[in-house]
Amino acid sequence: MELLLILTYTSICIAIFKIFNIPLTKWTVPTAALGGVVIIAALFVIMNYNHPYSEVTREYFVSTSVLPSVRGKVVSVDVKPNTALQTGDLLFQIDPKPFQYKVDGLVAQLGSAELDLDRAILLMEKKVGKQRDVDITQKRVDDLASQLNDAEFKLTETSIRAFSEGYVTQVFVQPGQLVAPLQFKPAMVFVESETFRVIGWYRQNSLLRLKAGYEAEIAFDGIPGEVFAAEVVKVLPVMGEGEIQASGQLYKINDVNNVQSGRVPVVLKITDPEFDQYADQVPGGAYGQSAIYSEHAHHVAVLRKILLRMASWLNYLFPFH
């Protein structure tokens, strides 16, 4: 871009010198050269501040570990990795027989206890039984009903289902394998479709030129020669570099003086319809570059757009192996 501006300015200077017959002297030539340096430098300073650029932009997503709520043997794995799923689709099935046996046993006990309660109430009404017998029987009925509810819940939990739209990207279980609700032993990794976000990391110097609603553009490394229109959705209010957690000691400057200043995370949304044809090809975590065009000095935004497109075309070049 710098070379393009220099060549353009040089062409204008040559034309002016020719048209107005300006002599080439030790004063006119340096003046023209100095004027070019000042003009080009001013353009770049204005562009860099008012239309910030980030060479670190990535598409992020949230992954969730799929953990069973009950312990048991896997009888079937019903999901195919990286296949779109709807809420409620079956992921895998734990053998329900032991849990069904438990439910059946509690149903039988609860039925017997309810009959005992009816008899105790009838005897008390006939002045033969005692209120204490009714209370004891009622408590037994309530306890068995509570156990039955818990057993029925565990029975339903033997069918592990998708809790939102998305897909399973890794499967760690097979039929016949024993699974348990252990935090560090997930059965699958689930990716939620609605969590995909493109985030550009911008220098703090540009903070006053980062605002929701501003126009933006994104160029992915994996799609050389293409630049996609976008907009700023949100400027996140916190940065990871400033995070501290409660402890038993006060924080000292020595604890943080080596930490870098950090960059401001900005959430971007691709609005370009041309991106639809590439959406299925761009994997989560794709890397790229982005630029934001503020409402200030909007006429020099064209320089940033040209630079971003030049960077996109350079993505065709990569190391050969």
Image (cartoon, rainbow, N blue to C red):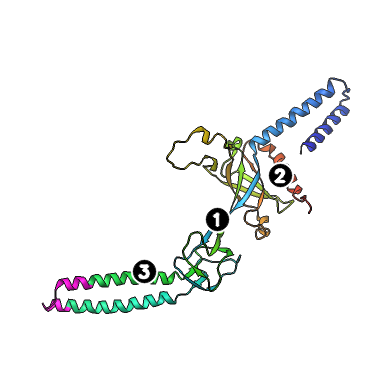
Q: Residue at x 79, y 38 (%)?
A: 4
Residue 7 falls in which quadrant of the image?
Answer: top right
Residue 147 is situated, as x and y percent measured from the top left of the image, at: 33, 70
Q: Earlier in the sequence, mark 3 or mark 2?
A: 3
Q: Residue at x 35, y 78 (%)?
A: 105
- Extent of the magenta region: 122-137
> Looking at this rendering, what residue extends furthest in the left direction?
127
The prevailing secondary structure element of the residues shown in magenta is: helix
Q: Residues within 10 Å of mark 2 (few under 14, many from 20)?
A: many
Q: Secondary structure at mark 1?
A: loop
318, above or below 146, in the image: above
Q: Amino acid at mark 1?
A: Val
Which residue has dot 1 on it? 62
State which tag comes first along the sequence, 2 or 1.
Answer: 1
For residue 150, the mark is 3
Which residue is at the front of the view, 194 or 231?
194
Callout count? 3
Determine if the magenta segment contains residue 131. yes
Q: Residues within 10 Å of mark 3 (few under 14, many from 20)?
A: few
Q: Which mark is residue 308?
A: 2
Q: Residue at x 73, y 45 (%)?
A: 311
Identified by mark 3, the residue type is Asp
Amino acid at circle 2: Leu
Residue 170, placed above or below residue 16: below
Q: Nearer the viewer, mark 3 or mark 2?
A: 3
Q: Count residues near mark 1 (Cα–Cα under 10 Å), then give few for <14, some for 14-19, many for 20+.
A: few
Residue 306 is left or right of residue 133, and the answer is right
Give the secondary structure at mark 2: helix
Q: Nearer the viewer, residue 277 or 171?
A: 171
Q: CA distance from mark 2 to mark 1?
A: 28 Å
